[in-house]
Image (cartoon, rainbow, N blue to C red):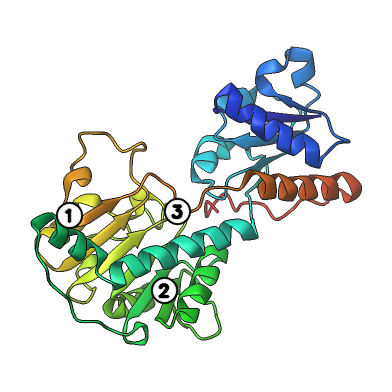
Amino acid sequence: MIVLVTRMSEDAERLWLTSLSRKMPGETIVPFRQLDEAAREKADIAIVANPDPADIARLPNLKWIHSVWAGVERLVAELGESRLPIVRLVDPQLSQTMAEAVLAWTYYLFRDMPAYANFQRQRVWQQLAYRRPQDVTIGLLGLGALGAESAARLRYAGFNVIGWSRSHKEIDGVQTFHGDRGLKELLGRSEILVCLLPLTDETRGLIDAVRLSLLPEGASLINFARGPIVVADDLIRALDSGAMKHAVLDVFDVEPLPPDNQLWDHPAITVLPHISAPTDRETAAAIVAGNILTYRSSGALPPTVDLARGY
C-alpha cells in the first residue's frame, strides 16, 4: 500500500490523491490522516510533500520515500536519520518552467524594467542606453537539470552564458567553471548572476559579502534557489552602496516573507512569492507513477538522494 503524507490542506491533498490514483489505478493510495495503526503497518512506499517526521516514524514498514518536490533539503534534514531512501522529483516540465522564469526575469533586468518603473513613479521621461544580449554575460550558479535548461533558453535569446557547479560539467556553448577558483572567476564576469543551487551545508551562506564584492560594478542578482544561500544583510549592503543594481528574490530564509521584513520595501529588490517554478501536479504524478511501477515490476529504485550531500 502507498501512503500519501503531506502538510497540505485536505483540499490540496485531495487534488494530489486524485492525480496520483489516476496514474496508478492498480495501487491503493491512502492519505496518512485516514490510516489506523493496522493500515499504517501495510504501507511500504510513502509519497510525500513536506511530511511531518512524526507521521513517517509511525510507518514501520516503509521501504522508500518519493517526494513530489524537486527541493528536498528540508526532507533530508528532518528524515535523514531514518536512512530511508529518498527519491526527489526530476521533472522535465519543472526545468522548462524554471527556464521560462529565468529568461523572463533576466529580460526584466537586462531591459532596465526596475529603472523604468521608478521613472514612472517619479513622472520622469527618460530613455536608457540599449545593450545587445550578446554584450551581456549571465552567470548561472548550478548546472543540473534546471541550470542546463536555463542556459539553453538564455543562449537562444542571444546572451553570453557562463556557469558554475560544484564539480566539473560541460554544456554546449557555455563556458563552465567549478571549485573555489572557478566560482571567483565566474562571479567576476557575471553582470546578472542567477542562483539555481540546491541548499546544502556547502551552499548555505555561499553568496556573502566577500563573494558579492567580486561581481562587476552594477551587477544584479536573481535567486530562484533557496533563501539561505544568499546572506540577505550582505546583499542589502551591496545594493545600498551602489555596488549592485538590483536583486530579484523568489526565495527567502522564512516563507511566507513576514510583512515587517525590510526586503519588501527596498527600492532595489523585487520580491516574488516563490513562483519561479511551481510543480505541475499532472506531470509530477506521471513521473512518480512511472518510478513506482518500475519498482513494483523490477525491484529497482530510481536514483536516490545522497543524504550526505543533501540532493
Q: Is residue 21 left or right of residue 184?
A: right
Q: CA distance from mark 1 to mark 2?
A: 26 Å
Q: Residues within 10 Å of mark 1 (few under 14, many from 20)?
A: many
Gap between marks 3 and 2 measured at Cα: 27 Å
Q: Earlier in the sequence, mark 1 or mark 2?
A: 2
**Which residue is labeled 2 in the image?**
179
In the image, taking residue 263 as reference, residue 22 lies left or right, namely right
Disc 1 on helix, strand or loop?
helix
- Image height of 31 relative to 140, above or below: above
Q: Position of residue 297 (x, y in %)?
A: 90, 48
The quadrant where residue 117 appears: bottom left
Q: Is residue 223 above or below residue 87?
A: below
For mark 3, does the 10 Å Cα neighbourhood hold few (<14), some (14 to 19), or many (20 or more) residues? Answer: many
Q: Quadrant of the C terminus?
A: bottom right
Q: Position of residue 65 (x, y in %)?
A: 68, 39
Residue at x 59% of width, y 29% of height: 12
